[in-house]
């Protein structure tokens, strides 16, 4: 780890004014410190923002949520209103990391969580995400855990977050504050595909700060669930996951949101699958057609071809679980 300066701030406007390309925010530090130890990220200054008043979970007037950027994952997952009204979010968070990490990790940090691709984290190997234009060692290397959706010829790194998948299904809005003022970004537009610039992962501008996230309530009568498939039962990243929000009226799916994790270069909204499901009665055949549509554009590499079928089965199983909770 290279030497760096450290400062604290208790004012959001001051924090934004002080930030820049070489001055980064730190809260829980569960990803940032790891990458600093590996010299993958080498900020000159860390600005500790734990003193900012951004650590509250609040209900909104319409029954939705306002989640401060500094809310710890454990507090969010165990919040009574989240557990009862937004089960998919609670389940997704509790499926990730360990209790100790969840006690430190924050909402804002999770939105910005970096890939676990081994080539990104090891300076010996070429990585366009770490060093633009250097190449991608993962293409013909160990790519078993990497993405099959949203990839490019320059990067196949997977977005690792469970929380982001649930927030994508919930169509969350990200609230930002920067030197030019405040703005909002739908989560579907917050993370960007790698294309030819995989080092650009989000629309966040230098010095810009995530202040909070808002989520509208689910439709009355809707249910939600999160299913994660992984190599071991805990402290493991998803090989495939699915976040489902589902409502059935008169034996027909009237509302459906489906997001996938473990398979995309960003949290993956499976709109093609939603189009298949909406307006149809729930059945194994319809679920399988939806899964086929969701993975139609998959581009697997040598070692992760199994993810195509695994993700399809994950989708079908998650839909069955959601439907069964309505019976």
Image (cartoon, rainbow, N blue to C red):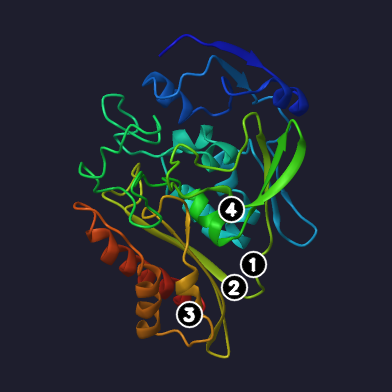
Mark 2 and mark 3 lie on one chain; the one further toward the N terminus is 2
The residue pinned by badge 2 equals 222
Nearer to me, 311 or 127: 127
As drawn, the label of residue 46 is none
Closer to viewer: mark 2 or mark 3: 3
Q: Is residue 124 left or right of residue 44?
A: left
Residues tagged 1 and 2 counted as in contact (Cβ below 8 A): yes
Q: Position of residue 302 (x, y in %)?
A: 19, 53
As drawn, the label of residue 277 is 3
Q: Cα distance, mark 4 to mark 3?
A: 23 Å
Q: Is residue 286 left or right of residue 279?
A: left
Mark 4 and mark 2 lie on one chain; the one further toward the N terminus is 4
* Looking at the image, residue 286 lies above or below residue 150: below
Closer to viewer: mark 4 or mark 3: 4
Closer to viewer: mark 4 or mark 1: 4
Residues tagged 2 and 3 counted as in contact (Cβ below 8 A): no
Residue at the (25%, 45%) spot, across then down: 139
Q: Is residue 160 left or right of residue 27?
A: left
Dot 2: what SS?
Answer: loop
Nearer to me, 53 or 33: 33
Q: Position of residue 319 (x, y in %)?
A: 43, 73
Category of crowding for the residue at label 2, using alpha-carbon neighbours closer than 10 angstroms: few (below 14), some (14–19), many (at least 20): some
The residue pinned by badge 4 equals 189
Dot 4: what SS?
Answer: helix
The residue pinned by badge 1 equals 218
């Amino acid at each position: 780890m290279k030497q760096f300066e450290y400062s604290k701030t208790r004012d959001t406007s001051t924090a934004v004014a002080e930030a820049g390309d070489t001055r980064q925010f730190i809260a829980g530090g569960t990803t940032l410190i790891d990458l600093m130890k590996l010299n993958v990220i080498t900020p000159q200054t860390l600005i500790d923002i734990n003193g900012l008043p951004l650590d509250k979970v609040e209900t909104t007037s319409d029954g939705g949520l306002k989640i401060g950027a500094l809310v710890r994952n454990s507090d969010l997952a165990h919040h009574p209103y989240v557990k009862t009204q937004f089960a998919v979010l609670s389940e997704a968070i509790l499926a990730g990391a360990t209790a100790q990490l969840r006690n430190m990790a924050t909402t804002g940090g999770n939105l910005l969580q970096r890939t676990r691709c081994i080539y990104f984290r090891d300076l010996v190997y070429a990585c366009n995400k770490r060093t633009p234009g250097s190449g991608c060692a993962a293409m013909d290397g160990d790519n078993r855990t990497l993405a099959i959706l949203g990839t490019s010829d320059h990067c196949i790194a997977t977005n690792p977050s469970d929380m982001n998948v649930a927030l994508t299904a919930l169509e969350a809005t990200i609230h930002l504050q920067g030197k030019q003022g405040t703005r909002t970004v739908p989560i579907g537009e917050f993370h960007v595909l790698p294309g030819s610039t995989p080092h650009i992962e989000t629309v966040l501008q230098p010095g810009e700060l995530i202040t909070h996230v808002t989520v509208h309530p689910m439709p009355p009568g809707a249910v939600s669930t999160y299913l994660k498939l992984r190599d071991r039962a805990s402290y493991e990243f998803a090989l495939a996951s699915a976040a489902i929000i589902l409502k059935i009226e008169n034996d027909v799916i009237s509302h459906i949101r489906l997001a996938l994790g473990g398979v995309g270069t960003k949290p993956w909204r499976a709109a093609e699958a939603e189009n298949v499901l909406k307006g149809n009665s729930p059945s194994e055949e319809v679920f399988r057609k939806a899964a086929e549509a969701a993975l139609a554009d998959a581009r697997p590499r040598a070692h992760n071809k199994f993810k195509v079928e695994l993700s399809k089965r994950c989708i079908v199983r998650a839909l069955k679980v959601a439907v069964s909770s309505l019976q």
